[in-house]
Amino acid sequence: MQLDNPLWHYASAVYISAEVERLCLQAQSYGLQVNSLLLCGWLTQQRQCYQAAAYRDNDAGWRASFLLPLRQLRYQLREQVASRPLFSACYAELKNAELEMERVDIALLWEGAQSAPAADPASTPQVLMEQNLRAYVDSQGLLHKNGCWLCCQQLGRVFLQLPVSS
């Protein structure tokens, strides 16, 4: 597994945008995974197509067993920090651990992306971005959830406006 990979560099570069962060967290509130959304943006930049089957094991294994439970624990502890300041150090450590787990998640996504098919050369970046995001959102069964797809379309437009090098 390669933690320092092109997808990690892309994710680090685009997530510093306040608009990307806001839209990713909004999409997360619908049940989507931020790293998968970032993957869709990166695949578009690489002129590749998102295929849900390549990432199913990651979703069912790593995320479900480790990343999501740790995130839930951190959220629960965050609620306690205001009334129990002694928990602050524990919360900070969980946040750091979650970031490292996110990095592993991105490395696993990057591994899956190595077999991503090339996009149709005639597809515009806008069309490819929409196809990639739609494929991901649909694979999560959230395409018709009120507001979810609109949020992802906005995110796709923001991704395309960012000056990120390959």
Image: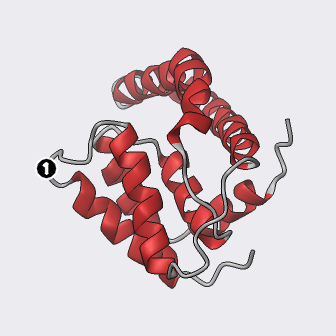
Is residue 7 in view from this perspective?
yes
Where, by quadrant of the figure, is residue 58 drawn? top right
How is colour applied across the structure in the image?
A: secondary structure
Residue name at image x 33 percent, y 50 percent: 27
Q: Which residue occupies 58% across, 72% down? A: 120
The total of numbered circles placed on residues is: 1
Q: Secondary structure at mark 1?
A: loop
- For the C terminus, give its image quadrant: bottom right
In the displayed structure, 57 sits above or below 123; it is above
Return the residue found at the far left: 146
Q: Is residue 8 above or below residue 79?
A: below
Q: Position of residue 151 (x, y in %)?
A: 28, 61
Q: Residue drawn 36% across and 37% down?
A: 140
Left or right, 45 with respect to 138, comes to right
Residue found at the far top of this picture: 65
Q: Is 41 above or below relative to 109?
A: below
Question: Where does the image place residue 76, in percent across and percent down from the top left?
Answer: 38, 22
* Residue at image point 66% right, 68% down: 13
- Which of 157/133 is in front? 133
Residue 24 relative to residue 1: left or right: left
Residue 5 at x, y = what percent? 81, 53
- In the image shown, does 49 or 165 lie closer to the viewer? 49
Few, some or many C-alpha atoms within 10 Å of disc 1 (few <14, some 14-19, many ≥20)? Answer: few
Residue that label 1 marks? 146
Locate residue 102: give its quadrant: top right
Q: Is residue 18 visible to the viewer in this orientation of the structure?
A: no
With respect to residue 51, does 129 lie above or below?
A: below
Q: Position of residue 28 (x, y in %)?
A: 36, 44
Image quarter in which the N terminus is found: top right
Q: Amino acid at mark 1?
A: Asn
Q: For this rendering, which residue is in front, 86 or 54?
A: 54
Q: Is residue 48 left or right of residue 22?
A: right
